Amino acid sequence: MNKKNTLGVVIGRFQVPDLHDGHRYLIERVRERCSKLLVVIGVTGGFTSKNDPLDFETRVAMLKKEFPKATIVKMYDHSSNEAWSEALDKTIERLFKGHKVTLFGSRDSFLPCYSGKHSKKYVYPKKSVPSGTEMRNKVGVKVLDSEEFRTGVIYASMKQNFPTSFQTVDIAIRHSLEPKVIVGRKSGEKGWRFPGGFVDPKDLSLELSAKREAREEVGDVEIDDVKYIGSYRINDHRYRKSEHKIMTALFSAVYIYGALRARDDLEEVRWQTFDGLIDCLLEEHKSLGEAFLRSQGVK
């Protein structure tokens, strides 16, 4: 077989602590058939996550250790398979113009997603090879007592170098007839706060997030007339020394019925009159209290 000017392309995320036998088997088959090897590493372009914990540089080091002659590049995710395929073809053309190109894949590979101009070849996988998900689930729950482990944890934290503004919601639930509002208190806190918390990725809107937090923290109460008041930067004590901060969206609502009962991380809930509201609130919630009172026409 004439391998001259042939390029074998392997594409994967390689989100594993070490290459498994399936990775090695696939890449070795490509090296046997082609004169040059291009490994394309999939990159989301977003923050690391449970499914994508390793950055590009870490995966390059892992691959270069076993395949030092491979050319390794990153390929960002695209909005469609067609756009991704076009971008991949342009990268191959830029790096290996004039080569006969074959894209190789195996189990759960990119092959069904590729619609570009190059040929594709399926390599039957070795049996009993764990998936990347299985490998991550196995090692992701272990704390290792080693300097290298702690160094890795620090590196991962330092690489998450985009300061993040975490989205939260707070909701001021007012009485329908009397000038008072529901407040809650956490264990160990001297001041009171509005019910609220972090937005869940499953929440379809901030309004629904506020309703969910109300149910979770003050009991099975029915509320109505949920209205957005404004957004406010919260000087949360957990993030005062961090580059990450909290932005909350404050809502008001009208209490309809239901017994108040402290739940979730609240130790106590109660009705608080408007005239004593600001004085009872935690320092970080005073600005929310002032905004709520202004929305009610209270100066």
Image (cartoon, rainbow, N blue to C red):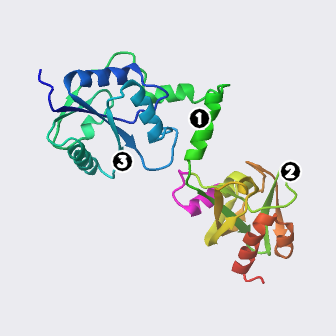
Question: Callout 1: few (<14), some (14-19), or many (20+) C-alpha neighbours within 10 Å?
Answer: few
- Quadrant of the rendered structure where residue 66 is? top left
Mark 1 residue type: Gly
- Quadrant of the rendered structure where residue 69 is? top left
- Is 282 situated left or right of 224 in this image? right
Q: Are marks 1 and 3 in contact (CB under 8 Å)?
A: no
Q: Are marks 2 and 1 in contact (CB under 8 Å)?
A: no
- Residue position marked by numbered label 3 in the rendering: 77
- Is 90 situated left or right of 54 in this image? left
Which disc is residue 175 wearing? Answer: none
* Mark pair 1, 3: CA separation: 25 Å
Which disc is residue 152 wearing? Answer: 1
Q: Secondary structure at mark 1?
A: helix
Which disc is residue 188 wearing? Answer: 2
Mark 2 residue type: Gly
Location of residue 229 in the rendering, given as x and y in whole percent from the top left corner? 64, 73
Q: Earlier in the sequence, mark 3 or mark 2?
A: 3
Question: Callout 2: few (<14), some (14-19), or many (20+) C-alpha neighbours within 10 Å?
Answer: few
Please tell me whether mark 2 or mark 1 is closer to you in this view: 1
Stretch in magenta: 201-212
Q: Earlier in the sequence, mark 1 or mark 3?
A: 3
- Is 150 situated left or right of 184 in this image? left
